[in-house]
Image (cartoon, grey):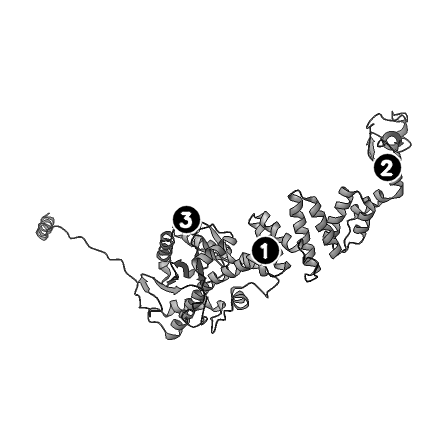
């Protein structure tokens, strides 16, 4: 008891217990060398900004390694009109987005570099987020969503973002329970438009190919995309001390992402130019199908009519396959609009361009058979096709035969066919099974040009057709 009293007295002498304060350990960060633009360092990620003066004919400052020496960025007004042709709403300021990740799978890929580009007055502003610590991904995504929220409701424009970038960012935001309505709004994927216009005309539709063939942009010393994930892991392993080699390669990745952001507005403008003024019939057909996907059927019909119903339709410059496809497409639009006469002219044009085309022969033969009643000509058209329909061929042969024509002219009313049941025993014993050989009064009535057979009990009834 005495020892307990002594302990209590000592406790009273010490006074009230002081609370211990625990500090959250912070990661050690190393400074990053400033690049063109402003650099903001945050815990676990770095935000880099730059401003590029736009306007037609204004050459850009030479970028970092892996980028072109000059770019021509479209102004906001020109870009806005270009995006309207791609399906964007009028008056919206677009925001271009591009990511660099550790892989191509949605499940385990990590977006360690995210870039945005948008017009700010007469200039194009870029902002890039680079992850320097794995635990800071949530903070980096929060800052990204804050920037998108500040820019207001704007359509996101990307290259292959509908299939990769945006689904990945949404999945990473859900992982950290971040509300991301900014990633759920209007989105334009330039890859879709590029494929509609240039698939089959270019070796491929990769961004680097489009830059070289259409924009005249050549990257010097660009880092291959397959090496980008390894650069991030090397830079993460070398931190915080850092190595000159990994730092230089990371700067090349940042420049690669920056050039992607700057060429997206140029690609959107090039797409709009081809949509407004296609160079040939093949391009016009691609543009018309693009307009149909946007629901602009009347514009697509007017565009194809300029190429197919104008004075230069028979100049022979277009390939027969392209001419057939374009004529059939326009004929379908005319038929939907109720202008069958114009559609018939195009079906005839498609068939005369390639008489062996199955699609053209079928369309022209249908019109001849069902609307003009010229069965002989329809039969000749079907017989000349590479893949004639057997049922159509047999029907036209019957309808075009002289016997059918004579019957059609001499008979005032259509013939009526009746059915007479005939008793057919299945076996000698079954004949005496109660039917007595009498016809079964089942199934009597009018039938078409066919012959049926049914079985009732032990007796088969076959219907014999007569007039």
Q: SS class of the residue under badge 2?
A: helix
**Distance between the Cα atoms at labels 1 and 3?**
32 Å
Q: Classify mark 2: residues with Cα within 10 Å, few (<14), some (14-19) or many (20+).
A: few
Q: Earlier in the sequence, mark 2 or mark 3?
A: 3
Q: Earlier in the sequence, mark 1 or mark 2?
A: 1
Q: Position of residue 362 (x, y in %)?
A: 74, 49
Viewed as shown, does residue 361 lie left or right of 148?
Answer: right
Residue at (87% x, 25% y) in the render: 435
Viewed as shown, does residue 198 lie left or right of 221?
Answer: right
Residue 180: give its label. Answer: none
Q: Classify mark 1: residues with Cα within 10 Å, few (<14), some (14-19) or many (20+).
A: many
Count of labels shown? 3
Q: Is residue 132 visible?
A: no
Residue 204 figure quarter: bottom right
**Distance between the Cα atoms at labels 2 and 3?**
69 Å
Instruction: Compare residues 345 and 52 and report the one nearer the observer.
Output: 345
Q: Position of residue 319 (x, y in %)?
A: 69, 61
Q: SS class of the residue under badge 1?
A: helix
Disc 3 marks which residue?
Answer: 181
Residue 408: give its label. Answer: 2
Disc 1 marks which residue?
Answer: 287
The C terminus appears in which quarter of the rendering? Answer: top right
């Amino acid at each position: 008891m005495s020892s307990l009293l002594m302990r209590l007295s000592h406790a009273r002498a010490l006074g009230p217990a002081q609370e211990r304060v625990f500090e959250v350990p912070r990661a050690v960060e190393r400074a990053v060398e400033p690049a063109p633009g402003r650099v903001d360092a945050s815990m676990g990620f770095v935000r880099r900004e730059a401003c590029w003066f736009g306007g037609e004919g204004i050459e850009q400052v030479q970028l970092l390694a892996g980028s072109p020496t000059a770019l021509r960025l479209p102004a906001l007004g020109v870009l806005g009109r270009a995006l309207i042709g791609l399906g964007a709403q009028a008056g919206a300021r677009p925001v271009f987005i591009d990511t660099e990740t550790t892989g191509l799978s949605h499940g385990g890929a990590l977006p360690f570099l995210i870039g945005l580009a948008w017009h700010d007055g007469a200039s194009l502003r870029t902002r890039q987020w680079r992850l320097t610590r794995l635990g800071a991904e949530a903070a980096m995504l929060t800052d990204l969503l804050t920037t998108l929220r500040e820019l207001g409701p704007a359509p996101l424009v990307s290259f292959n973002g509908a299939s990769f970038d945006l689904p990945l960012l949404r999945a990473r935001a859900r992982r950290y329970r971040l509300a991301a309505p900014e990633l759920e709004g209007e989105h334009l994927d330039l890859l879709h438009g590029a494929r509609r216009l240039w698939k089959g005309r270019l070796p491929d539709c990769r961004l680097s190919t489009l830059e070289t063939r259409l924009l005249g942009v050549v990257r010097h010393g660009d880092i291959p995309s397959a090496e980008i994930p390894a650069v991030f892991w090397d830079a993460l392993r070398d931190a915080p001390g850092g190595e000159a080699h990994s730092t230089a390669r990371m700067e090349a990745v940042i420049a690669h992402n920056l050039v992607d952001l700057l060429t997206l507005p140029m690609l959107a403008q090039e797409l709009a130019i081809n949509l407004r003024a296609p160079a040939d019939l093949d391009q016009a057909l691609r543009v018309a199908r693009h307009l149909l996907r946007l629901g602009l059927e009347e514009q697509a019909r007017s565009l194809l009519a300029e190429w197919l119903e104008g004075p230069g339709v028979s100049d022979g410059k277009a390939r027969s396959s392209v001419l057939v496809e374009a004529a059939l497409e326009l004929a379908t639009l005319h038929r939907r609009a109720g202008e069958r006469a114009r559609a018939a002219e195009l079906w005839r044009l498609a068939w005369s361009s390639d008489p062996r085309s199955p699609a053209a022969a079928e369309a022209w033969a249908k019109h001849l058979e069902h609307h003009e009643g010229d069965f002989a000509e329809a039969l000749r058209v079907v017989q000349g096709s590479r893949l004639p329909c057997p049922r159509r061929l047999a029907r036209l042969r019957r309808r075009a035969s002289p016997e059918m024509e004579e019957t059609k002219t001499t008979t005032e009313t259509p013939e009526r066919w009746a059915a007479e049941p005939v008793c057919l025993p299945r076996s000698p014993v079954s004949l005496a099974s109660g039917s007595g050989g009498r016809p079964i009064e089942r199934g009597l009535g009018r039938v078409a040009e066919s012959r049926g057979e049914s079985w009732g009990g032990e007796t088969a009834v076959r219907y014999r057709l007569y007039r």
